[in-house]
Image: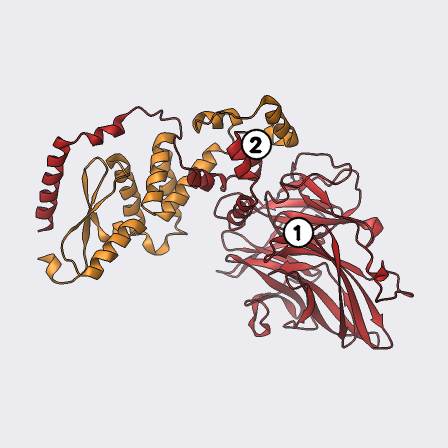
Chain colours: A orange, B red
């Protein structure tokens, strides 16, 4: 039995909000501070059993993506910041998704405390919306304009050059 | 064995699925082209990574975005993200050529320049300093006695500080023989304790009788909007400040030479601490050959650096602020003749260090293979080089500079 030789766990089981199970290697799971914390807690208790971590806020679609990211980054754990290949992969990874998926992915990264994924998503979203018009922003963020026409015009006038 | 346990858990889960339909909740229709229900803290995470122009535009999306973007704590968190280069295309180098200012973005081709239009109506503005994307300027013509202007070119806001009460009018001192315009110097920086930008104006004079140099400083903070007076005297010789002030770690530094009997004895750094509002001195690693002080960004911190010329050119960095023993030689190379002095250096994202000289060339140095390469500058001789970050600082202030017309940043390409 693998687990009898040491007190540390090699795998955990993560449960998505729609009740699907994912068996995750410990090194991969450690990319998420939330999962890492759970593992550390269990190890402190000296448990040898496989542990089940339920994530009530993450659907299996999104969890698959987060785990795909974690798996890739676990391979590069030592030189996370400056690896060009990894940066390229990150970009290709996010490029595929629509806004709704990015939205859920960002929220999942936040919930699972996967800081690098959260930073990556936020920067990616920022880069993709930076040239949009105010109207487009209201549409994609589903925001209702609560300024009076006069108020809006005043703010616009103050920085008219930014609207070219 | 693990496999067995997993199967067992899966069975239990399947069982529970049958009894509950809660998982179906997630299949409701969501428009894939929108961000819906993104919590505010995540919206902030996204906004603080946006460039300044986008934020100025997005201020009129709705009231909550407006108050978010104009919030001082958002402005400072945006600044720290931008200056730490977490996001792309934000960190630049500022060059001043007389009355003209140019920006060069880090990682852009080295001949791609943006000219910052100077404030219309003020013909001859010289730079006092640059901090957090705000330039402090004074009019060349009214040296020392005219008003100072704080100007953030990224948001095109300018702010005129009230006229200082000239120090020589303060009761304690008489300046019978001194022409104040001869010995006046400014400094501009940030007091990180009171979170306030401060400007200091220093008159200094040589007291023959007592054989000391007297410094008379007026300090003005942006939020308090009034001037206070600080005095200081230094022994050892006649001080002469050589260069505009450099702000690092909440302290303004001026390179000075000390003159005894008309001979330069050595050079030193006069400091003015913006937090405690008092003067001091810092010993240089090479008191005679020091040519220029500047700040350099190494890692996340700005450090005090000094360039030296003499036997070759080199740059020293004060690793630990205030600790004289921590001066470390960062660069050491021979540039040949007629290179002038090294004005400043910036570290690019690829690790290369770009050094700018006073005769208008720029040398890029790769620390990994010690290779030097000449790069083009606008064909002028710069008198000032510093890091520049595009920020929202001053966004909350009213435009108070006279005749300040808003003009776009012009992108110029110089030399191919």
Q: Is residue B271 above or below residue A68?
A: below
Instruction: Report the number of numbered marks.
Output: 2
The chain under label 2 reads B
Instruction: Check if mark 2's residue and mark 1's residue have beta carbons within 8 Å.
Output: no
Mark drawn on residue B325:
none
Q: Is residue A63 above or below residue B218?
A: above
Q: Which secondary structure, mark 1?
A: strand
Q: Is residue B104 visible?
A: yes
Q: Position of residue B108 (x, y in %)?
A: 55, 44
Q: Which residue is mark 2?
A: B57
Q: Quadrant of residue B152?
A: top right
Q: Position of residue B315 (x, y in %)?
A: 61, 65
Mark 1 crowd level (few <14, some 14–19, many ≥20, 10 Å Cα) = many
Mark 2 or mark 1, earlier in chain: 2
Q: Which residue is mark 1?
A: B130
Q: Position of residue A69 (x, y in %)?
A: 31, 43
Check the image and name the residue furthest to the top.
Answer: A149
Mark 2 crowd level (few <14, some 14–19, many ≥20, 10 Å Cα) = many
Depth check: B10 or B346 in front?
B10
Depth check: B217 or B104 in front?
B217
Of tags 2 and 1, which is closer to the observer? 2
Marks 2 & 1 on one chain: yes
Q: What residue is shown at x 23% (from left), y 53% (from top)?
A: A26
The chain under label 1 reads B
Depth check: B16 or A141 in front?
B16
Query: Marks 2 and 1, how far apart in space?
Result: 25 Å
Q: Position of residue B32 (x, y in %)?
A: 35, 26
A56 vs B389, left or right, is left
Q: Quadrant of the C terminus of chain B?
A: top right
Q: What residue is shown at x 43% (from left), y 36% (from top)?
A: A125
Q: Is residue B240 above or below residue B375?
A: below
């Amino acid at each position: 039995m693998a687990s009898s030789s040491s007190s540390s766990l090699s795998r955990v089981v993560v449960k998505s909000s729609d009740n699907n199970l994912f068996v995750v290697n410990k090194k991969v799971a450690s990319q998420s501070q939330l999962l890492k914390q759970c593992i550390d807690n269990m190890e402190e208790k000296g448990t040898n059993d496989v542990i089940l971590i339920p994530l009530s806020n993450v659907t299996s679609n999104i969890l698959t993506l987060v785990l795909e990211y974690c798996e890739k980054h676990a391979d590069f754990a030592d030189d996370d910041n400056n690896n060009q290949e990894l940066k390229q992969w990150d970009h290709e990874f996010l490029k595929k998704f629509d806004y709704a998926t990015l939205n859920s992915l960002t929220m999942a990264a936040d919930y699972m405390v996967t800081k690098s994924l959260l930073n990556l998503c936020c920067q990616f979203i920022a880069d993709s919306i930076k040239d949009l018009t105010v109207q487009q922003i209201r549409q994609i963020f589903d925001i209702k304009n609560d300024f009076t026409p006069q108020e809006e015009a005043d703010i616009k006038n103050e920085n008219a050059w930014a609207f070219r | 064995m693990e496999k067995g346990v997993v199967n067992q858990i899966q069975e239990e889960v399947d069982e529970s699925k049958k009894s509950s339909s809660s998982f179906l909740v997630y299949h409701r229709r969501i428009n894939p082209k929108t961000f819906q229900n993104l919590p505010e803290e995540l919206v902030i995470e996204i906004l603080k990574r946006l460039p300044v122009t986008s934020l100025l535009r997005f201020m009129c999306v709705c009231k909550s975005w407006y108050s978010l973007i104009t919030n001082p704590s958002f402005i400072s968190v945006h600044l720290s993200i931008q200056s730490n280069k977490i996001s792309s295309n934000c960190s630049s180098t500022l060059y001043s050529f007389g009355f003209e200012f140019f920006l060069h973005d880090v990682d852009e081709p080295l001949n791609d320049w943006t000219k910052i239009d100077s404030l219309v109506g003020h013909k001859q503005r010289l730079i006092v300093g640059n901090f957090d994307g705000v330039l402090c300027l004074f009019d060349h013509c009214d040296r020392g006695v005219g008003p100072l202007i704080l100007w953030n070119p990224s948001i095109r806001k300018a702010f005129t500080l009230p006229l200082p009460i000239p120090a020589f009018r303060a009761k304690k001192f008489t300046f019978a023989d001194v022409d104040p315009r001869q010995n006046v110097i400014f400094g501009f920086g940030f007091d990180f304790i009171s979170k306030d930008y401060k400007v200091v104006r220093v008159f200094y004079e040589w007291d023959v009788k007592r054989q000391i140099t007297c410094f008379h400083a007026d300090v003005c903070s942006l939020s308090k909007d009034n001037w206070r007076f600080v005095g200081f005297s230094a022994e050892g010789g006649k001080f002469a400040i050589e260069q505009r002030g450099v702000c690092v770690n909440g302290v303004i530094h001026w390179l000075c030479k000390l003159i005894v009997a008309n001979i330069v004895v050595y050079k030193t750094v006069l400091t003015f601490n913006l937090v405690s509002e008092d003067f001091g001195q810092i010993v240089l690693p090479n008191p005679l050959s020091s040519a220029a002080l500047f700040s350099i960004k190494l890692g996340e911190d700005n450090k005090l650096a000094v360039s030296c010329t003499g036997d070759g050119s080199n740059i020293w960095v004060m690793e630990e602020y205030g600790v004289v023993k921590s001066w470390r030689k960062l660069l050491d190379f021979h540039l040949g003749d007629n290179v002038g002095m090294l004005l400043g250096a910036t570290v690019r994202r690829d690790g290369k260090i770009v050094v700018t000289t006073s005769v208008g060339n720029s040398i890029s140095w790769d620390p990994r293979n010690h290779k030097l390469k000449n790069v083009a500058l606008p064909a002028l001789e710069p008198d000032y080089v510093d890091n520049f970050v595009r920020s929202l600082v001053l966004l909350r202030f009213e435009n108070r500079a006279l005749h300040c017309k808003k003009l776009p940043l012009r992108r110029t390409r110089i030399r191919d």
